[in-house]
Image: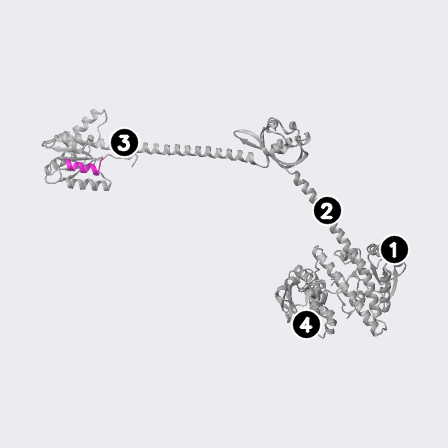
Amino acid sequence: MKPADLIAPNHRILVIDDNCAIHDDFRKILGGDNQAGLELRDDEAVLFDASPEPFTRFEIDSAYQGENGFEKAHLAMVQGRPYALAFVDLRMPPGWDGVETISRLHAVDPNLQTVICTAYSDYSWNDIRERLGHSDSLLILKKPFDNIEVIQLAHALGRKWLLARQAEAKMADLNRMVAERTAALEAAHRRIEREFSERSRSQAAFRTIFEASAIGITLMDMDGRLVAVNRAFEEQVGFSEGQLLGKNALEVGSLSPETFQELRRELSMRGFFDAREVVYRRPANGMRTALLWSRAVQIQGSQRLLGLSLDISDRKRMEDDLQRARVAAESAANAKSEFLANMSHEIRTPLNGIIGFTQLTLSTELTADQRDYLETAESSANALLRILNDILDFSKIEAGRLDLERIAFSLRECVESAVGIVLPAGAEKKLDFSSRIGPDVPDALLGDSIRLRQVLLNLLGNAVKFTAAGSISVEVSATGLREGSAELRFTVRDTGIGIPLDKRECIFQPFRQADGSITRRYGGTGLGLAIATRLVEMAGGRLWVESQEGAGSAFHFTMPFPLVESPEGPDPGFHESRRSAGEPLSILLVEDDAVSQAFVSALLTQHGHSVSPAGSGIEALSLFERGSFDLALMDVQMPGMDGLQAAAEIRKIENAIGGHIPIVALTAYAMKGDRERCLEAGMDDYLSKPFQANDLIACIDKLKTRLHGTVNPRPPHDDHCHCNALPAGN
């Protein structure tokens, strides 16, 4: 509905009468400019003490039967142009009479003002009211009617229709305002109820948490005096609520004065503190440790200090126990490492003498039986060395103390070297050996060639061990080539005994073999494949096996390698020697073990070199200052001044007088970091004991090549003979 001030006056009148003349009369009276209308306008002005209004021209519509009048009234309502007033004749045969017509009109338009026009007394007023009911919208006009009377009715009822509509609009506005206000009040009421309910639930939840929490909770006033505590806090400090309320931590005696004042200052400056570790006193069991949190909060309009307290005494005790256990474990680990290092030295030193003198003796004139006995002794010593190296390697891997190097090497030389080492053992069984490297496989790689060869030697050694007849092959192919890197796949095949399907996983586990009887029949520690697997995985690859029992096995492993444009050239760090490459060298041999000293001296003398032995670092310095040497072989562990100190002192002397003598470390230590310590002390190379005779000669020849720039065709014999690289210990 429109607002009341926007409702316009309605001058539409419907006349329903079966007499045409009546319609003409109404048009003359209400639709024309007559004198009676003007007089009525003047009378209204006088009556209502207002200026005369413009004369109103009413819009008159005619209907000659009740049914026709009803249709027009209904259509007007549909169109939104209702009539304000209807003059209805009482008697209109045939069809509806005036009373029926008015009843129908009020049904379709309850706001329509109606006037019954009648010349007869067919119905009394009571009869009409009984049929139509009580209504303030119904009047009676007797025929013949007076013009002034008609005009008055038209104006009055038209104004009444307008006022009634405005009143309805005003009432609707008021009802809407009341409804909106009521809705707003109801919403506010519901919000207040909800907030009250939520606050009640929050308070109940806080109280539940406050009482049930395992962490001590306190509320204090701004002076630090307790106003509320939970049960956990009572149990924590050993006082009841009655003993605590109204007091502060200092008055209770829990905190020391220094700690209490420090916490007060921090709260005053920052307004909070978090996870402050404090020591407090508990009456029952003395000093305890707790973590404290505190901050200012608003509770029911009051400023409070909320405090949380967590006893961590047990945790601190556990941390102390763990710290002591960690120190003990580190001490045990250090003791274990030291034990392994000492055992390595103590075993390798006599092995060096056994293997060395056995090889020297084998180079002399011997009977067949003597040679057979010595070769058996050499084989046994080498087997013992392999077991020692396996155990040390596995210990280093398990402890995370083994690192892979990243140096340039030739893949083909590495593969050929591994095959060459096992070739004599395979020849004894009359096994056919073959190797194939794919044409697209790059040769110049960056990586740890010693560890790669160790993996290949392990797989090739197992292939020879478990193959009685047939063949062994090595294949290398490229599975992925990208700019600057390559992933290579290595395969070692044999026609040996094969591996049962249910045993293929356990062979890669430490100290496990496919069959316990194999250990007794073929020997071995059961560490080889476990070490090979770890080395391959450390390099970023994987190792697996394909096998058929009784028909042989194929071990595969992959490794990624960065590429290099060309292998590394000679080390430019050595100065030109005054001797030529073919001439013997003057060698300073520093070795405190008499057996090792005798073996190395005899070996070097056989190869034409001049040897000056020294039994200690101090004696070596004395000889160095008095003599002139091309090379020094330096034992590391010696009484008094050890080899590292002696090498450092030699470098100091050289810095003062000039020159540079290559120093090779000869040591029975083969643990992680030993090589680095030797190089840091000023040594140029590293050779671990026990070494083969060919190892030492090859290392000296390599140094001669670097000294004089000549090419030495002698290849390394096994994994101990290499410069500036940690030995594999196969």
Kind of residue at badge 4: Ile
Q: Position of residue 573 (x, y in %)?
A: 78, 61
Q: Secondary structure at mark 2?
A: helix
Instruction: Find out whether the residues at labels 1 and 3 contact each other: C-beta distance under 8 Å.
Output: no
Depth check: 307 or 70 in front? 307
Q: Which residue is mark 1?
A: 618
Please tell me whether mark 1 sits on a helix, a strand or a loop: helix
Q: Is residue 19 magenta?
A: no
Name the one closer to the observer, 670 or 697. 670
Looking at the image, tell me whether mark 4 or mark 3 is earlier in sequence order.
Answer: 3
Query: Which picture quadrant has residue 21?
Result: top left
Task: Say which amino acid is labelled 1.
Answer: Ile
Q: Which mark is residue 327?
A: 2
Label 3 with label 2: CB-CB less than 8 Å? no
Q: What segment carries the magenta color? A: 99-110
Up/down of 384 relative to 370, above or below: above
Kindly state the secondary structure of the residue where label 4 is placed: strand
For this orientation, the residue located farthest to the right is 626
The answer to whether residue 622 is left or right of residue 550 is right
